[in-house]
Image (cartoon, coloured by chain):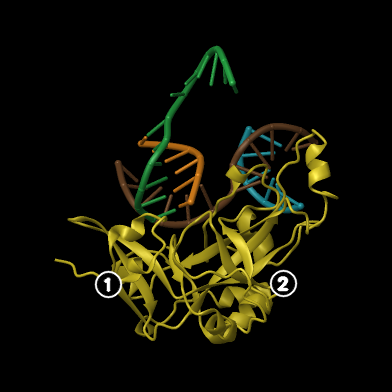
Chain colours: A yellow, B brown, C orange, D green, E cyan
Amino acid sequence: MCGRYSLFVPPNDLAERFDLRSVEGYEPRYNAAPSQSLSVIADEQAETLQHMEWGLIPSWADSRDDGGHINARAETVAEKASFRAAFRQEDDGPLAAGRCLVPANGFYEWTETDRGTQPYRVTLSDDEPFAMAGLWAQWQPPTTQTGLDAFASGDGDEAGDPDVVETFTIVTTEPNAVVEKLHHRMAVILPEDDEERWLRGSPEEAQSLLELFPADRMRSYPVSTAVNDPANDSPEVVEEVSLG
DNA sequence: CCAGACGTTGTT
DNA sequence: GTCTGG
DNA sequence: CCAGACGTTGTT
DNA sequence: GTCTGG
């Protein structure tokens, strides 16, 4: 699956790789974790890096607790109520939803060993950044009836409302030969040529892109358990360690 | 009709 | 064990 | 994903 | 919002 990843490429490289006019707000991350505000490229405003919380909350959720979906299964993403609107790029009134690319240059998997849980980092063999298939949605927290909130939040019914929360999830599928040694699910990695179609294609076309990424283009290596703590967001967590 | 759920992973 | 926070 | 908390009353 | 269960 994918519950932690990295993205620490130079801003200019990121802009060039994903055809971005702006990477404003981008900060290199060695240990990106759920609930954090992270960089994505959405089907709307794809020329600008967007920042959303990792953990999708559907527009109809009554509270944040109804969301927090950090992964969505590729096999059912077109049907599940929580993801269907985003997958089909259907807005809910003023609240938008759609597909996105989640840029990364590695992700982490934890595997059980006799010595405990060992984290691994998975990257492309050439160490280049890549895109994971993602979905995003806007969510409006329920407004309290004090009147103060309505004043503080302006009109209260526009997508640009400061109260609107933007969240995303990462699509998962069965693992390829590299990742199956570590786990039985993995993030969908889109070949670069499929990225535009993930953002712009029909639902049928998008569904067809959720396939295995070739294992011969990926590698994995063990890293320190320092990566376990999301607070350790520093270069040390991507360094290879020797087991034994 | 209304009420209630709406997810994934891993583990048992 | 289970939930919340990052 | 892992780490860390896991409570109440009363008072400021 | 939309679907399923009663």
Q: How many C-alpha atoms fall within 10 Å of the one at disc 1: few (<14), some, or many (≥20)?
A: some
Residue A192 position within the rendered picture, expressed as x and y whole percent measured from the top left = 54, 85
Viewer-proximal residue, A40 or A76? Answer: A40
Is A210 placed above or below A140 here? Answer: below
Query: What is the three-letter code of the residue carrying label 2?
Result: Glu
Q: Is residue A116 left or right of residue A48?
A: left
Circle 1 sits on which residue?
A240
**Residue at the spot x=73%, y=42% of the render?**
A142
Q: How many C-alpha atoms fall within 10 Å of the one at disc 2: few (<14), some, or many (≥20)?
A: some
Circle 2 sits on which residue?
A44
Q: Quadrant of residue A135?
A: bottom right
Quadrant holding the C terminus of chain A: bottom left
Residue A1 position within the rendered picture, expressed as x and y whole percent measured from the top left = 42, 63
Q: Chain of mark 2?
A: A
Numbered label tally: 2
Q: Which mark is residue A224?
A: none
Label 1 residue SS: loop
Query: What is the three-letter code of the residue carrying label 1?
Result: Glu
